[in-house]
Amino acid sequence: MENYITKRRLELASQWISTYNGKSLVRGYARHFSVDLICAIIELRMLGHHISEEYELANKCSIADRLLQKKKKGRLAQLFSRMIQATENSNLLRLYQQRCTLRHSAGLDR
């Protein structure tokens, strides 16, 4: 199934490229056909367009950096969530202790 989709996209791409007027063929291809930049580079090379290795490497590094940032952001979000949870738990514990102290002082815990 995936090979059929790729073949069909490559057929359509030939027609689309001849009408494309934008600045970046790779980015335009990726947006138009809803593929990532690396897939766009590979398919444009299959169609005979020259895309430099440096451009491909720069895009791979950019993708890796974004994934790293998301991972760090996820860790920070988890840490923040745990801090909030701990604060809520400590507030609940403090309220429970106050309640127990009041019950004890009122003689209701016997």
Image (tube, rainbow, N blue to C red):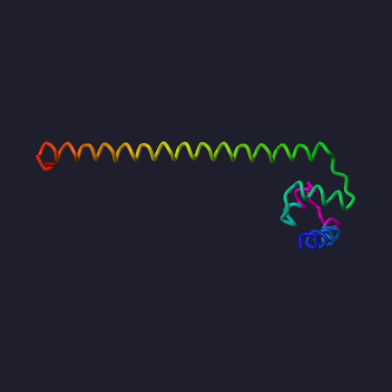
Which is more toward the observer, 86 or 14? 86
In the displayed structure, 89 sits above or below 19; it is above
In the picture as drawn, the residue positioned furthest to the right comes out as 48
Residues in magenta, as a range: 17-29
The answer to which of 15 and 97 lies nearer the viewer is 97
Q: Residue at x 80, y 39 (%)?
A: 55
Question: What is the number of callouts on the image?
Answer: 0
Name the image quarter holding the C terminus: top left
* Residue 40 vertical placement versus 84 (above, below): below
Task: From the viewer's perspective, tell me whether residue 38 is left or right of residue 18.
Answer: left
Give me the residue at 81% from left, 63% from top: 8
Expressed as whole percent of the image width and height from the top left, the position of residue 104 reads: 13, 38
In percent of width and height, residue 81 lies at 44, 40
Picture coordinates of residue 107, whole percent (x, y): 9, 40
Residue projecting furthest to the left: 107
Instruction: Name the residue: 23% across, 37% down.
Output: 97
Q: Does the magenta stretch include residue 36?
A: no
Q: In this view, does 103 lie to the left or right of 86?
A: left
